[in-house]
Image: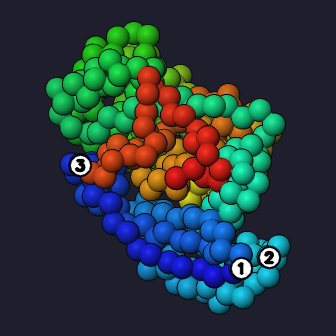
């Protein structure tokens, strides 16, 4: 086996405001595994330092350690386990995991989802993501999303004029479209309690990561009528079975790849919570991998995977009618 690495930068069509800062570009590390017979598998490492605390340099260091493990390894060797022993960084392990699944799908001449489940879904429902702009801008984006067929809209909150933007978006999308909020842990328990009491009339599907930490989430959930989901907090030790939330957002990068995400989903479901899959503004390989995993786990609530369209580069995985088709070609399909 041989491992090749390439850094790549994707630029957002316009600056993206989030609870952890404004993003203008996204740097990824694309990996290619080449077997002795020339067959290849592709993956990517997608750390987002403001979100998960992992820099691109840290991920690159882990992947360079993997080069020494992978080089010359025979076919069928337990590469992922060997890489984990060299450096257990999930964001880097995800790149190897994705490449191995891609390679396996190509060898079997089937999409990865067919290796994961007997009857995977052909398409996955996704939510539209509305950036944190003015109430008028948010309303226009949300109305356009509904016109395009989205049935779930996610709005960034935890910034300024939250109530005005939520009110404007709900008015724009009507009463039947699901509305979820994402605060990226911007509130304290007291702030979240006040905000969610004020936002109660707007019929929220759920609020994602309103506060940070298991204890804060547990206390908040006891005080509000809104369904609570964890995202960043899902990385905390014991979070997947802690029973502090109604739903858990799982991500390919944070879980260490497809295999890690499926294992995490089993733990969450055993605890009684729902699962949905999202991205950290991943590239095409990361989104394709998440689609295959979501298809194997279906049915799911709307997943946060419609993010490639936020970049300047054309998306190879378009959204049609609020759904993303799982690539039907062998491997990851991108």
| Lateral position of residue 259 relative to residue 154, left or right | right
| Lateral position of residue 133 relative to residue 330, left or right | left
Report crowding for label 2: few under 14, some 14 to 19, many 20 or more residues within 10 A (C-alpha): few
- Res. 307 visible in picture: yes
Query: Callout 3: helix, strand or loop?
Result: strand
Q: In the image shown, does 37 or 275 lie closer to the viewer? A: 37
Q: In the image shown, does 329 or 284 lie closer to the viewer? A: 329
Earlier residue among tags 2 and 1: 1
- Res. 58 visible in picture: no
Residue at image mark 1: 36
Q: Is residue 314 above or below residue 205?
A: below
Q: CA distance from mark 1 to mark 3?
A: 40 Å
| Residue at 51% in and 34% down | 324
User: What x and y, as percent, mark residue 225?
Assistant: 53, 22
Q: CA distance from mark 2 to mark 3?
A: 41 Å
Residue at image mark 3: 13
The answer to whether mark 1 and mark 3 are in CB contact below 8 A is: no
Front of the two marks 2 and 3? 2
Q: Is residue 145 above or below residue 27?
A: above
The answer to whether mark 2 and mark 1 are in CB contact below 8 A is: yes
Query: Which quadrant would residue 201 be assigned to in this image?
Result: top left
User: What x and y, as percent, mark residue 27?
Assistant: 37, 66
Report crowding for label 1: few under 14, some 14 to 19, many 20 or more residues within 10 A (C-alpha): few
| Residue at 60% in and 52% down | 332
Residue at image mark 2: 75
Q: Is residue 251 above or below residue 320?
A: below
| Residue at 35% in and 43% down | 309
User: What x and y, as percent, mark residue 45?
Assistant: 52, 67
User: What x and y, as percent, mark residue 134?
Assistant: 17, 33
Front of the two marks 1 and 3? 1
């Amino acid at each position: 086996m041989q491992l090749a690495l390439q850094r790549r930068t994707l630029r957002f069509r316009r600056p993206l405001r989030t609870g952890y800062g404004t993003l203008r570009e996204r740097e990824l590390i694309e990996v290619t595994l080449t077997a002795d017979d020339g067959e290849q598998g592709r993956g990517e490492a997608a750390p987002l330092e403001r979100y998960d605390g992992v820099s691109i340099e840290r991920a690159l260091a882990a992947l360079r350690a993997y080069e020494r493990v992978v080089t010359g390894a025979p076919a069928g060797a337990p590469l992922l386990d060997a890489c984990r022993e060299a450096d257990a960084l999930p964001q880097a392990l995800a790149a190897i995991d994705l490449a191995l699944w891609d390679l396996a799908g190509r060898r079997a001449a089937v999409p990865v989802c067919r290796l994961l489940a007997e009857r995977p879904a052909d398409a996955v429902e996704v939510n539209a993501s509305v950036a944190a702009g003015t109430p008028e801008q948010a309303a226009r984006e949300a109305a356009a999303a509904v016109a395009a067929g989205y049935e779930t809209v996610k709005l960034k909150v935890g910034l300024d004029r939250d109530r005005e933007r939520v009110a404007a978006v709900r008015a724009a999308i009507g009463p039947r479209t699901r509305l979820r909020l994402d605060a990226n842990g911007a509130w304290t328990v007291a702030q979240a309690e006040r905000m969610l009491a004020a936002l109660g009339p707007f019929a929220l599907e759920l609020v994602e990561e309103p506060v940070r930490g298991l204890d804060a989430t547990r206390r908040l959930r006891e005080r509000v009528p809104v369904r609570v989901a964890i995202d960043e907090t899902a990385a905390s030790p014991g979070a997947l079975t802690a029973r502090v939330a109604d739903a858990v957002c799982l991500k390919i990068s944070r879980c260490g790849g497809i295999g890690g995400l499926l294992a995490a989903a089993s733990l969450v479901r055993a605890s009684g919570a729902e699962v949905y899959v999202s991205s950290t503004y991943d590239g095409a390989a990361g989104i394709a991998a998440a689609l295959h995993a979501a298809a194997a786990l279906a049915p799911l609530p709307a997943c946060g995977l419609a993010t490639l369209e936020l970049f300047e580069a054309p998306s190879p995985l378009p959204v049609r009618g609020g759904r993303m088709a799982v690539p039907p070609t062998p491997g990851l399909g991108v």
